Structure formats: C-alpha cells, structure tokens
Amino acid sequence: MKMIIYLFLLFTSFTVNSIGTTVQKFNFFDLTRQLNIFLKQQYPSNKDHISIILRTPLKKNISCKKPIFSLLNNFRKLGLIDVLLTCNKQYYYLTVEIQSEGEYIAANRKIPRGTIIKESDLKVLIGRLDKLPNNTFRNKKDVINRVNLRDFLPLQPITSLMTHPFWMVKVNQQVTVIIDGHNFTIFSRAKSLSNGAIHENIRVQTKTGKIINGIINKNGEVIVSL
C-alpha cells in the first residue's frame, strides 16, 4: 500500500493529567502524522516543496503510547531513506521516499573545459532535487569563479565534483611570501607545495628547506602572520 503524505506541521492535542504526563495513545493515523512532524524537523530551514511517500505499509490497528522515530541512514537527505519506529518495545523498519522540488544551478550555454565560470554562464532551474546528485549546486555564488573540469552542455546540472576552485597558486610555483610580525614585515620567495585558491591555507617551502603555512591573498601572495 502506498500512502502519500504531504509534509506539513500539524499541532497534536494531548490529554494530560495533573502532573503533566501524556496519557493519549497514538493510532495508525496519528503515527503517520507524527512521522510527518518528525521528518519536518529534519529540514528546519528548507524552503523547497517537500512531499513524503510512505513505502512501507503499516497495520491499521497499530497503537503506540509513545512513538519514537529515528533515521537509520541520515547521510541521505532526499530520495529513499530508512526510518526506525519504536512502538511499545517493538521495532518497525519503514522505507520512506522524500521528494523535493526547488531551485538548482545549471549551465546556461555550452561551457568549454577550463573556463572560469561567470554568472552569465549559469541558469537557475526548478526541478526534482531528489533526482539530482547530492552535491548539485543550489546557489550561483557557489559556482562563480570556479573552473570546470569538463565541457558543460546547456541546461546540464552543475555539481561540485565537476568543478574546482580557481587556483591563485599552483603546485611548485614560486610565490612571494610576506611574513607579518610585530613592527616588522619580511618579503621572501618560496615554492608552493600544492594548489591553492584565494583565502585558502597553503604550505610553502623556503629556499632553506623550511616549510611554513600561510593564507593566499587576492594577489596570489602568501601571508604568514606571526
């Protein structure tokens, strides 16, 4: 039995005794509502349109004093997920499909490999997010100034694995090192030991063989603060 449950937050009324103890039992329909509320809490700031499909049928005569839900594979946020329901010391494994629709970033045109991506290269599309890779970009600002590792086709979704930051400094490059100390500044030259983007930490090796860490500035210089 497939039951489609639209994700919305409902207030549940409880019968409470004089010391504040909940005495109401939850029936089948209350459980589906509580599952709905539980999953809503997993997306506290999500503005996408989300719907839930319960793929595991529950017995209609099931009744719980205090249902407890927990995620079994919480590394996945969309698509099929597993939820454990603990009910009167019994366990029920539920398969739930979370569908989400929202904005994502795609190529606005064909972008040749090695391009420094500009805002005009990007297009915002609306579609099923659960059908896209987990690392698909959602905001233009996260893609601008990155470099694509392969050709992009028009309307192709862009993921973080398809791009890398624009390297201000490349491995084995000779760079200027600026050492800022108290009341003094030293300029030197060193060899970078890895690629690095602006504002990233990078390790460089001086002519004497000493390895130091610094931050890359907008000019491609490595700043070392003492």
Image (cartoon, helix red, strand yellow):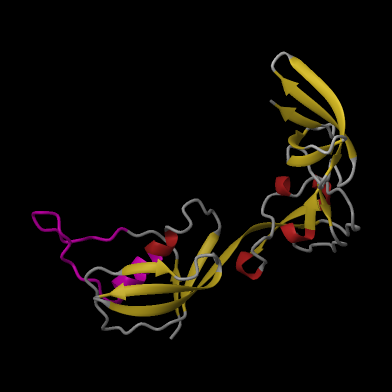
In front: 139, or 86?
Answer: 86
**Residue 21 colored magenta?**
yes
Q: Give residue 60's quadrant in the image.
A: bottom left
Q: Give residue 110's quadrant in the image.
A: bottom right
The magenta span reads: 11-36
Picture residue at 27% right of the left edge, 61% below the top: 12
Q: Is residue 54 left or right of residue 119?
A: left
**Residue 103 placement (x, y as % from top left):** 65, 56
Picture residue at 39% right of the left edge, 67% below the top: 70
Question: Please, which residue is most extreme toward the left here?
Answer: 18
Picture residue at 90% right of the left edge, 42% below the top: 173
Q: Is residue 101 visible?
A: yes
**Residue 124 placement (x, y as % from top left):** 72, 54
Q: Is residue 66 left or right of residue 130?
A: left
Question: Please, which residue is most extreme toward the top here?
Answer: 183
Q: Is residue 159 visible?
A: no
